[in-house]
Image (cartoon, grey):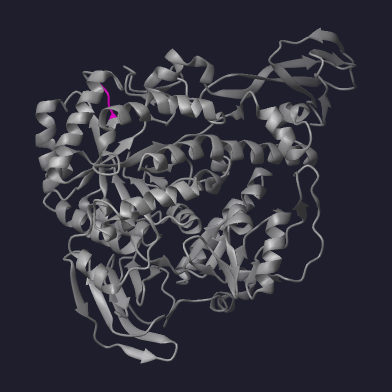
Amino acid sequence: MKAFYLLAVLMLLLTHVPSYAQSWRVVTRPEYAAMQRGFASPPLPYAQTMDFGLGANLVPETIARQLDSVYKQGIRAISIEGNYNSPEPYLSPGYMERVKGVVSELKKRGMHLWIIDEGKYPSGFAGGLISKNAPEYRMQGIVVAARIRLKEGEKIVDHQLPQQVISAVALNEASQENKLIDVGSGRLNWPGAPGNWQIILAEHRFKTSVTRAASNPTHGKDTVNSLIDYLDPEATRKFIEFTHEQYKKWIGDEFGKTVLGFRGDEPEYNFTPWSPRLLEVFKQKKGYDIQPYLASFFLPQPTREQKLAKADFWDVWSDLFRDNFFGVLSDWCARNNLEFMVHINHEDKLMDLARSEGDFFKTMRPVQIPGVDAIWHQIWYDNIADFPKLASSAAHMYGRPRALSESFAAYTPRPTVADARWVVNEEMVRGINLFEWMNWGSAYLRDPLFPALSAYTNRASWLLANGVPAAKLALYCPTETMWLGNSMADSTLRLTGRQLLEHQLDFDYVDRQGISTVFKLEAGGFVNASGQKYTTILFPAVDILTTDVVERLKAFAAHGGKVIFMKGLPSLLVRTSFLQAEKMPPFNWAAQMDADSAGERFWTSLPHDIVVGKTLPALKYLHRKWKAADLYFFFNEGKEQADVDVTLEGTGPVTTWDAGTGGVEKMDGVLQEKKGTKIRLSLPGYGTKFIVVGNK
């Protein structure tokens, strides 16, 4: 897949468009002069996109007029999706004719198109065609089939079970003690025991997470239209047949030209997944039969053994989710000269995400443009959130230049343009460089302030999508510990991330995949697929590590890297399966440092690429490296003026780049020092500044 994708990108770079205009698809280390040439009017693929629902009001005679309005507001790309009350059913020939008309009008204006891959959301039900025309590919889950309550001494002898019942466990309702019951023969036997017991029977059945369909007359969420079995590659290919292949049939000649790619939305399980080959694949990967443990997943207080077995199960199905849904879609897009961008659900609540999607970084590994979703005021003046860094960290780790945020859906009250500018900056300084403006509405298309925000965001994204990320710090995301139910893994992760940024210490989240199979060892650290080097890896609360991670960390430390455990050492080591986890042997290649007890000494001991004269929690920054220059983006998230001396990595002339006007000016008051370049940074409340050091 990777080789094919790189070949496709290379062919693009050699064909019908200027090479620098295609740099949005690959990680670059651009020259100063090229960036300056493109700054005022960046290549259009870097432009932000706005959702454009094909509903009743967008008939052919109004599409041109609507696109003219969008264009006047500075929008150069749209994201289309099937909407309510459309005169033609989603994916019907009539609908595709309208899509073809939209592409024609976009091409006239030099605009671009992203295709939202579903008639509302989540991705994967093909507007209802999966349920209607391919029901064998519907989503499946493991659920409680029955709870049989038995009084003291009551027995069940040779009770025939329905075929779909696959596991059973007995629970003492007073003590919460439990016992697994073997139902492999298809029959249930319980000899009776002291106390009152509850027999929990688990079965697999067709079951779907809720969907919101454009064709649903209630406009609500329900389970009428089933999602596909995300763990089955054939189900994903059937979804592609009903959706992507239809777009290819009608507008495929504009793939990679007017049409940039597809965007997925919130694929998830809100129950325990099942797929017909899951037990077989599990045994191949883990070496034992998980079936006896499945019913124990529904216990309020599972044993340590049962928690470990459940972690194995989550490890396996999240692998299948990555490979058989995200991987299949990404491969199809790469073969068709397109990008696949997607966000999942619960990025701001990783314990919930671990239950519903398994592992954020697994899902994003094959994806060309990793994303997050910022809705419901998850990011606001009184709710500064760092979760956009999940998307940018995935992009950095896996060598992707862009990171998406679907922003502003369901914000109430509706943000003003000034509010939106703050949210955009809050996300951009955490690495987002592609925005999809959701539910922005026709009122904003008439707002005289919006074109300035649109131009600013397009230029800023051009700057922030080019160059190699420069953060030296990595913060391990302990998903495996979350699978064991330890919420401290999530809370200490978020707390540490917040504290790092408030001390002007930029970082990336990293994970087991990155450490074990992506990063290359070099003197002094790990180098990710973007060419960025991490010299220090921090660990929040973590109970368990896998041997592949441990061995790589030992090598990292031997090459000069620094490993710091902030909340104690992990107690368990996993070789093949969590169930057979061993006690972690002693090791001396890592340090233990608690930031709470060490105080400021801890933060100053970490590697900095900027040094500020005083700690300002509201001051955030981002750093990317060009061929012979360093780009810095500063954002003052607070209301108060920020005035501080800052020493930057890099030497040479210093210029400020105004993303509002497209102008570049020399910066005065610069002092060249042995360790970098010292400037005086003055930012008003909510102010931003782009600074470039060097220009050769």
**Residue plotted at (48% across, 66% down):** 531
Quadrant in the picture for the C terminus: bottom left
Q: Quadrant of residue 301?
A: top right
**Residue plotted at (47% across, 72% down):** 503
**Between 137 and 573, the one nearer to me in the picture:** 137
**Between 602 and 166, the one nearer to me in the picture:** 166
Position of residue 270 measured from the top left corner of the image (x, y, whole percent): 54, 31
Image-based side of 213 in relation to 201, left or right: left
Q: Quadrant of residue 428?
A: bottom left
Main secondary structure along the magenta-highlighted residues: loop
Q: Quadrant of residue 256?
A: top left
Does residue 415 show up? yes
Query: Magenta stretch containing residue 84, yes or no?
Result: yes
**Residue plotted at (23% across, 29% down):** 99
Position of residue 493 measured from the top left corner of the image (x, y, whole percent): 57, 57
**Between 644 and 396, the one nearer to me in the picture:** 396
Q: Which portion, as a residue range, is magenta?
A: 82-86
Position of residue 429 measured from the top left corner of the image (x, y, whole percent): 37, 62
Position of residue 328 measured from the top left corner of the image (x, y, whole percent): 49, 36
**Residue plotted at (51% across, 48% down):** 365
Image-based side of 657 in relation to 314, left or right: left
